[in-house]
Amino acid sequence: MFSLCAAGANAATLTISPVSLVLDSGLTSALFEVKNLEPRPITLQARINDWSQSGNEAALVPTSDIIMSLPIATILAGGSQTLRLLLRPGTKTGTDRERHYRILLDEIPAAGTSPAGSALRCDRRFPCS
């Protein structure tokens, strides 16, 4: 279960399944499900980043290698949404280098739910190789 956010913020409680995705050679898509455990609808925006690590330093760089369908989704209270990752046509998959990505799910605050100027976007991150 993920609930990563700054202290004091009202972050949504979600479950994500599976929490790690692998696109083996020859595969071009994968599915994962996001469940909203909150008593209110939530809107999420997905961002895909290339991930690398050198020593203790991780680097996230926006990438267009993978397309997320749906990039923005509203999930009803207690509901779930299946999201699809698609490898962009023309992305090289036959290299000798494994590629690693991180999917960031940003919660988009509902209009009128926070005082002016205090809206906070919370993100959840999980791996995709």
Image (cartoon, rainbow, N blue to C red):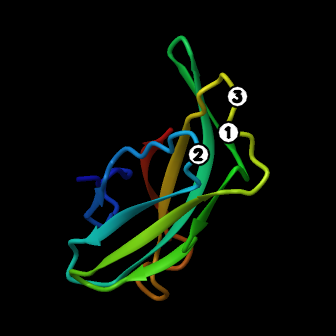
> Disc 2 versus disc 3: distance between alpha carbons?
12 Å
State the CA–CA distance, disc 3 to disc 1.
6 Å
The reply, left or right, for residue 109 in relation to residue 97 is left
- First in sequence: mark 2 vs mark 1: 2
Q: Residue at x 39, y 72 (%)?
A: 82
Depth check: give the residue in front, 4 or 85. Answer: 85
Q: Is disc 2 in contact with disc 1, using a CB cutoff of under 8 Å?
A: yes
Q: Amino acid at mark 1?
A: Thr
Mark number for residue 95?
A: 3
Q: Earlier in the sequence, mark 2 or mark 3?
A: 2
Mark 3 and mark 2 in contact (Cβ < 8 Å)? no
Query: Disc 2 and disc 1: Cα gap in Å?
Result: 8 Å
* Cβ–Cβ under 8 Å for marks 3 and 1: yes
> Which residue type does callout 3 highlight?
Thr
| Location of residue 20 by image quarter | top left
- Residue 93 numbered mark, or none: 1
| Residue at x 58% of width, y 71% of height | 71
**Helix, strand or loop at mark 3:** loop
Secondary element type, mark 1: loop
Q: Is residue 12 shown left or right of residue 45?
A: left
Which residue does the image show at 45% across and 69% down from the upper left?
A: 83
Count of numbered tags:
3
Q: Amino acid at mark 2?
A: Gly
* Vertical relation: 93 (above or below) 80: above
Determine which residue is flagged by label 2.
26
